[in-house]
Image (cartoon, rainbow, N blue to C red):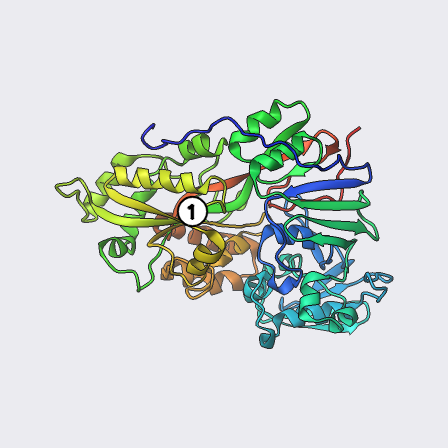
Amino acid sequence: MSRIFPLLFSAAVLIPAVSYAAPPADTIVVGLSADASTFETAEIRSADNMNIAQYLFTTLTQIGHVGTIQPRLAKDWTISEDGRVLTFNLPEGRTCEDGEALTADDVAWSYNRAADPARKFAGNTPGFVYTSMKFEKAEAVDDDTVAIHIAERNPMALGFTSQVFIHCREGMEKRTDDQIAREPISSAEYRMVEWSPNSQIVLEKRQDPGTFQKIVFRVIPEGSTRTAELLSGNVDIIANVPPDQVDAINASGVAKVQAVQGLRRMYVGFNQKDSFTGPDAEAFRKPEVRRALQYAVDVPAICKQLLNFECRRMTGPVNPPNDHPGLEPYPYDPAMTEKLLDEAGYPRGPDGVRLRTKLQSPRGRYLNDANVAQAVAAYLSEVGIETEVELLEWASVYTPLIRNHDAGPLFLLGSGGVLWSAVYDMAIMAQVDSGPNYTNWSDPAWFGRWDEMMAETDPARQRKIIEEMLEVFYKDGPWLQLYYQPDFYGVGKRIDWTARRDETIDLWDVKLAE
């Protein structure tokens, strides 16, 4: 095991805190690793950005801690018999930050604006939500009723309305694109009073709900600095605690780490794009080779040694508890890998090597990602797949490769998921040519069942199709299955707060500890 894990955790190095004071009783302070990039919500793509935007912009629905779909702006809703129209009833008296009444017209305008092809928006809403729910249009039936039209019945559609932010039309139409991105007009419970880029964002409460009068999001990229600020009492919650600092926080007496099994599915993709050529590329197109490599990697050991967490290995793209209950995670069995690779026609050569390949990975995007990639490569090399690791900067280098499906032939990636829908988690591969199908997998046993599954109205029959599709993914799928990434939050003893599994930093009910 020492050859696989040459780098072990070192003692946490805590940088002295900078000159911030402890927050007052009416203020909660959250330390994030990254700043928001925009408040043009149709361009938002990251969880950090979404976590801030949710306090500035309302949505029709929201997702509860255990995955239930709950009202937010909408009081209630109905779905038409054919499943193609979702009608939401809105309360009277809701207003925007500028005093404008918040009505069905604002909702319809916000939905249609994000879908406008002339605007060429490329964020989560137009790029994933709308394509997955097959959004067609929104219309205001009257001031208090809005109808969302979709192309066909879709079991994900209602849950997706929790991800489309609503704007105040009158104020937005008076603003430039830059003002929209930098100076948001709140339609929700808080308004922005300060944004100091790469430093902090300060929100002020303007209506219920919300326990604290102010929410401060501080941007602290360095993990040890976030820890130091937490232990100094200057920050109440920090996200993305480095695994090597968990013990120091728990022993501090002033804060604890809440570790949760998150919903981000971490995997190594086998890119089957035609532009990848060579023996390794041809091998990864074969289901029997991909299946053989599932046995080659000791995922529980990676979790324990590199993430300081007892991870659950994935069996497919769907998060528990919505995953296939009958599938067991692949065990670590390198002898089985060797046997199956021999049978697939890839014996070891005189030098002990079966194939040579490259594994690309971001550095610093995911929890200890560089070391995870190195460990995976070491395991593959031990069974004769000699693997070179290429570590790349996330934003300017790796993201374009992923977006254009050019990463690989092996690549490490994480994909966020949800608790409220198995279909949502599967939707990243709704079509062969869908954007999130970064592996270019095209198995008809999966893609040929998609329309049938989506059209099925009986929940039991639909679930049966889902499980049959998940069996295909498990046996022949395009991912080397790794784990659901754990999330570590440092929480000061000043507050009473519980971390969620879905990367949402929910501050609506947080309160001072008694």
Q: Look at label 1 and name its amino acid.
A: Tyr
- Residue 157 lies left or right of residue 351; in this view the side is right
The quadrant where residue 457 appears: bottom right
- Looking at the rendered structure, the number of numbered marks drawn on it comes to 1
Residue drawn at point x = 70 percent, y = 66 percent: 180
Whether residue 489 appears in this view of the structure is no
Residue drawn at point x = 53 percent, y = 55 percent: 423
The quadrant where residue 118 appears: bottom right
Residue drawn at point x = 74 percent, y = 69 percent: 172
The quadrant of the image that shows the C terminus is top right
Up/down of 272 relative to 325, above or below: below
* Label 1 sits on residue: 267
Find numbered disc 1 in the image and state the secondary structure of the residue it sits on: strand
* Residue 53, horizontal then vertical, whole percent: 68, 55
The quadrant where residue 82 appears: bottom right
* Residue 245, horizontal then vertical, whole percent: 55, 30
* Residue 157, horizontal then vertical, whole percent: 61, 61
Up/down of 36 relative to 144, above or below: above
Which residue is at the front of the view, 165 or 157?
165
The quadrant of the image that shows the N terminus is top left
- Residue 428 lies left or right of residue 16; in this view the side is left
* Residue 58, horizontal then vertical, whole percent: 73, 58
Up/down of 464 relative to 116, above or below: above
